[in-house]
Image: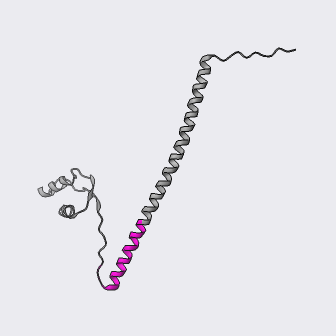
Amino acid sequence: MPQAKVVPPKPEGLRKKEERDSKIAAALTQLRAKRRADNKAKRAQILQRAQQYEAAYNTANKAEITARRNAKLTGQIHVPAQPRLAFVVRIRGINKLNPKVIRILRILRLRQLHNGVFIRINKASSNLLRRV
């Protein structure tokens, strides 16, 4: 009768390492599942927000078309809304510039050639841009 092979017990360090690794793996799978669920919810929110933006854009577009048509029918003039934001780029250097223009460029944060800034358009800023 052949003798049964006796398996020696695992070393304590190896057993502890396997327990620690299994705990870490369980925590990692739980964290991944939570992240997956969070990302799914976040994507649903982003989609809903994008649909709201699209609906608002379409509504504004239709209102603009309706206003233009009504003005044409009644013989009036329709002035479309002006943009509220502009990206301004400096394309000219410092040679032969009026001191007032130099000052305006400094106010607009356009100190260097080929620098650009976003500027909110209002009456004052449009006058500055016109002057420059």
Front in this rendered view, residue 5 or 128: 5
Residue 81 sits in quarter = bottom left
For the C terminus, the quadrant is bottom left
> Which residue ends up furthest to the left in the rendered image?
99
The residue located at (53%, 42%) in the rendering is 34
Q: Main secondary structure of the magenta part?
A: helix
Foreground of the two, 130 or 4: 4
**Extreme right residue here?**
1
The residue that appears at 44% across and 66% down in the rendered structure is 55
Residue drawn at point x = 70 percent, y = 15 percent: 8
User: Which residue sits at x=50%, y=54%?
Assistant: 44
In reply to whether residue 66 is colored magenta, the answer given is yes
Residue 118 relative to residue 101: left or right:
right
Q: Nearer the viewer, residue 19 or 103?
A: 19
Q: Does 75 sit above or below residue 51?
A: below
Visible residue check, residue 98: no
Numbered range of the magenta stretch? 56-77
User: Can residue 44 be spotted in the picture?
Assistant: yes
